[in-house]
Amino acid sequence: MNNWRDKLYRFMQGRYGRIDELGRFLMYLLFGLLLVSFFVRSSIFSLLILLVLIYDYYRILSKDISARYQENQHYIQAREKVRTKWNKLTGSHRDSTHRIYKCPTCGQKVRVPKGKGKISIHCPNCNCNFIKRT
């Protein structure tokens, strides 16, 4: 048993071998596709499942660690963009009493009450004043 473990250890040396956030997403996608394929029999789903599985194992067994790290970083950045847009869409309905403006000079977000008409907004970051309608 130890001999097999040593061979596996030597095989995995220098390989990426970790399940990062992209790998975890691919596994969840794989399980989701498997669940859908139980109800919808299609060769397209089978092919898609196979491709996701091959890509995930390729990432795990790859020796190009920097490329896998970059893929993971690109995935994280894309995920954060989607999350930010989603939060902007859903967050505007949560706060119906305030409006959020960006300071034109420094870009700091400033929260002001709604329904006050034309007001002068003071940025706490750069002490700039700008006029907006709420």
Image (spheres, rainbow, N blue to C red):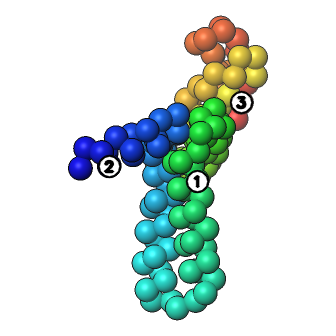
Residue 28 appearing in the image: yes
On the picture, is 104 further left or further right than 99? right
Mark 3, residue position: 132
Give above or below for 117 relative to 40: above
- 96, 54: nearer the viewer: 54
Q: Residue 51, position in %: x, y? A: 61, 68
Q: Amino acid at mark 1?
A: Tyr
Mark 1, residue position: 58
Cα separation between marks 1 and 2: 22 Å
Mark 1 nearby-residue class (10 Å; few <14, some 14–19, many ≥20): some
Q: Residue 48, position in %: x, y? A: 61, 73
Cα separation between marks 3 and 1: 53 Å
Give above or below for 87 relative to 41: above
The residue lying furthest to the front in this view is: 3
Q: Secondary structure at mark 2?
A: helix
Mark 1 against mark 2, which lies toward the viewer? Answer: 2
Q: Are marks 2 and 3 in contact (CB under 8 Å)?
A: no
Q: Which mark is residue 4?
A: 2
Q: Residue 53, position in %: x, y? A: 53, 64
Cα separation between marks 2 and 3: 70 Å
State the residue at coordinates (58%, 89%): 42
Q: Amino acid at mark 3?
A: Lys
